[in-house]
Image (spheres, grey):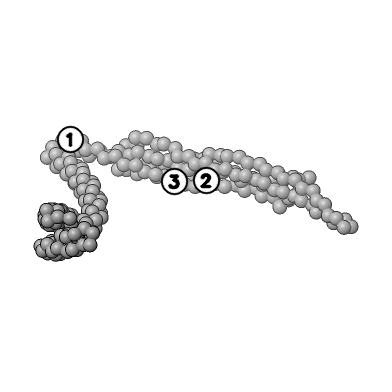
Amino acid sequence: MMKWTTTAQHWLMLGAEIDEQLSDNRYFSKGVTDWIHYSPDEDGLSQMLQELIQDANETQKDIKSITPLTKSTAHRMMHTHTDVSNFQDRSWGVGWGLGVGYGASYTSGFLVIIQEHEFVTEDEFKQRIQAVQDRKAAEKRAIEAAALKEKQQNELTDLLKVKADAESSVSELRSKAGNLEQLVERSKEITTKKKALRGVVYVVADVEHKSMELAQIYQTTVKEEHLSALSELEEALQQSDEIKAKIEMLQNALA
């Protein structure tokens, strides 16, 4: 047989007895005697302990420790007296104040630690140990799951903000690529125009150039800018899709 020990705590709480001595007198010359005294309810606390000891004897439990619990309170007494008199066209008054205070501590109860012993078989002892280990493992998994859920929720919140920025960027790049595509279409043709002072100029999409070579360079530049905008748009779309996929995965995990 093996010994299995279970430890428990018991709180025995009881309020304090209050003794009030209140005076109706409010004049210093006759004395001011307002006091409130706090003391432990010894009879009540003693009864609680006796009941606990009786239960421990009947159930064969060990009382390992008894710790007194204390509370404290403060009382302040203050009275004032004033006397106001009217004499002819003026008034006058005299007054005084008295303040007395004190603090006190009292026993409000006990904290009792109790142990109970059982003798069990070796197999049952192992089963209980395994149950304790399983409970601790389950608590650990619960804590880890809660931490993971919180982390995933924070990631989801951040990704939703990133998604909004990514969608805004995609919209801007799509608009830019569309404008450049229209410009490429308008830049396919090179026309000439005669100027009074400059002679002949070469026009590409309403942009005048001094030579055919410069006009052709402009055509190439417009095409390259369009291709670059399409590449940026494709990259932004890919990033946006990746963000949406991560968001969907986190939402499924949190569901």
As drawn, is 212 to the left or to the right of 64? left
For image coordinates 17% across by 64% down, the residue present is: 193
The answer to which quarter of the image holds residue 54 is: top left
Q: Where does the image place residue 38, in percent across and percent down from the top left?
A: 56, 43
How many residues crowd around disc 3 within 10 Å: few (fewer than 14), some, or many (20 or more)?
Answer: some
Horizontal and vertical percent position of residue 181:
14, 62
* Coordinates of residue 40 in the picture (x, y in percent): 52, 42
Q: Amino acid at mark 1?
A: Met
Q: Amino acid at mark 3?
A: Met
Residue 175 can be seen in this image: no
**Would residue 77 be visible to someone looking at this image?**
yes
Image-based side of 50 in relation to 96, left or right: left
What crowding class fits label 1: few (fewer than 14 Cα within 10 Å), some (14-19), or many (20 or more)? few
Q: Residue at x 18, y 57 (%)?
A: 209
Q: Which residue is mark 1?
A: 2
Q: Is residue 90 above or below residue 102?
A: below
Q: Earlier in the sequence, mark 3 or mark 1?
A: 1
Q: Which mark is residue 13?
A: 3
Gap between marks 3 and 2, in whole Å?
Answer: 10 Å
Circle 2: element type: strand
- The residue tagged 2 is 16
The residue at the point 60 percent across, 44 percent down is: 75
Q: Secondary structure at mark 3?
A: strand
Of residues 153 and 174, the one drawn nearer to the viewer in this rendering: 174
Which callout, 2 or 1, points at the residue further toward the start of the chain?
A: 1
